[in-house]
Amino acid sequence: MGDFLTSCYHKRGAGKKDGVSLLLQQGTCRQTALAFACVCCDPAAAGGDRYFTGQLLLWYRRMGALLCAKGRGTESRAVKESLERALRRVDEELLDYRTKMSGKCAGKGAEKGAGKDIEVSGILCGGDGFLLFHRGGQSIYQINTRFLRPNVKKIAGENTEVCGSGGCGEGQERFCIKQGILQPGAGVLLATASFCSNLTEEMLKGCMEMESLRTQRQLDKRLGELGREAEIRAKAAERGKGLGAALVVSLAEKGGGLRDGR
């Protein structure tokens, strides 16, 4: 079972609540290497993103990490079902809150976008496996070093679909959940739509030059450079929107890629 490197980037928008929150956890539990990352967007910039990531963090610390450790990874059915329940529960709580607030704000100018679903992209890695979950317009990229050359594949986002299961409250968009194996030398980039809107595949490949990627500082530097380039090109801060991204890399050995599981 390999180790992971993780990094994140967040550029705040103009407001105090820019609608973007990140979650990033890395460590070991019962000798099982773990990594948990999530990028969450609230279209209404009303704080729903922070609540969502906060509740997912509680789930991970109270239950998710232990379930992964017991099964030596994320491939057990118990881990997937527990994550699905956590996603549905938090979504239902937010739906109830928005319903109450929309009633109070009726005729008083309710916040724009208050009825929209929270956008989420995330990955839970345990040992050799992963659980990928996604909803909304955010992007998820697979970046690997197969054939000793970094290559990029968009596996979730606009005009793509992550096959899986999992539902939400009535009238809400479903979460897509996917299980698989994260092979050595592979990375998964989660990002807001504004982060990747003006970046090329060649720029994304720069995060995964495995021959020279060995330390946390190197990964932080690469993702930071990518984020600053995205900020310049998208000019998201001037529109009041935040930029967010998280990157999880498996570093057990050189080579490999991301192989789908069931």
Image: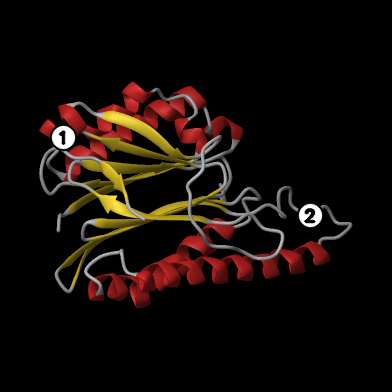
Horizontal side, residue 124 vs residue 127: left or right: right
Going from N to C along the chain, the mark reached first, 2 or 1, is 2
- Mark 2 belongs to which amino acid? Ala
Q: Position of residue 210 (x, y in %)?
A: 16, 34
Q: Position of residue 128 (x, y in %)?
A: 22, 56
- Mark 1 belongs to which amino acid? Met
Horizontal side, residue 228 vs residue 27: left or right: right
Residue 196: mark in rendering: none
In this orientation, does residue 54 appear?
yes
Label 2–label 1 contact, CB within 8 A: no
Q: Is residue 138 above or below residue 84?
A: above
Report the residue marked by disc 2: 110
Q: Position of residue 78 (x, y in %)?
A: 37, 74
Toward which corner of the image does residue 228 lie, by quadrant?
A: top left
In this orientation, does residue 38 appear?
no
Horizontal side, residue 151 vs residue 48: left or right: left
Q: Is residue 164 above or below residue 220?
A: below
Report the residue marked by disc 1: 210
